[in-house]
Amino acid sequence: MLLRRVIAWMAKIEAWTAGVLLGGCCAAIGCKLFARAFMDRALPWPEELCVIFLIYLTFLAAGALYKNAEHIDVEYFVDKWVPDDKRMLVFRFVHLCCLIGFIALAIGTWRGLPKAMNFTTGAAIPIPRGYTRLPLLFMSITNIVAAIAFLFFPTEDDIARPEPIEALEID
């Protein structure tokens, strides 16, 4: 299905971007450590840059996990207590709740964006704070699309009971 391929493509872009941002955090902290060790002074911007990158990567990675169905969800409880004939009903209920939550997040973020633009993130990198809310808005909108796809176009893989994981035997 084309919609599922688009969702998988969006998830792959979000996951790669989150990985690049994590690498950026490591590089910024490396610059700070290098400056402290060899130039005997601390740089003011790496910590603020890491905070901004961590905000972005958190929401991008969360969106990618939801789209790939790899997030922490109610699978444990569904697998343990829901009979097979009710799994589709529970699956739809969970994604309906997710859809409502993502819509609320998108509306709240959009409404708070103008006010957040009046404040800055920090002294070293004085960008408007509203820009740190953009990944939440992006994740909410793309996950609304994914939740609609999961809700109205479920596949057999979505509701299939996962294979049990065999325990490792130690001699």
Image (spheres, helix red, strand yellow):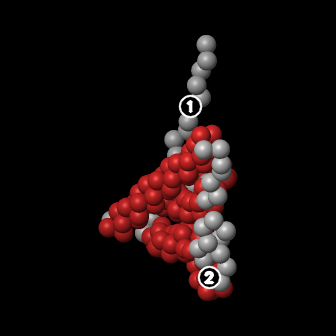
Q: Which residue is found at the position 33% from the left and 65% from the top?
A: 1
Using residue 65 as the reference point, say whether residue 116 is left or right of it.
right
Q: Quarter of the image containing the C terminus? A: top right
Q: Identify the amino acid type marked 1.
A: Glu
Which quadrant of the figure has residue 157? bottom left
The 10 Å Cα crowd at callout 1, few under 14, some 14 to 19, many 20 or more, is few
Q: Nearer the viewer, residue 53 or 75?
A: 53
Query: How far apart are labels 2 and 1 at the CA level?
Result: 52 Å
Task: Give the residue at the far top of this rendering.
Answer: 171
Tell me the element at label 2: loop
Q: Which residue is found at the position 49% from the left and 59% from the top?
A: 64
Tell me the element at label 1: loop
Q: Nearer the viewer, residue 101 or 126?
A: 126
For residue 166, the mark is 1
The residue beneath circle 2 is 117
Contact, CB < 8 Å: mark 2 with mark 1? no
Q: Position of residue 158 (x, y in %)?
A: 48, 57
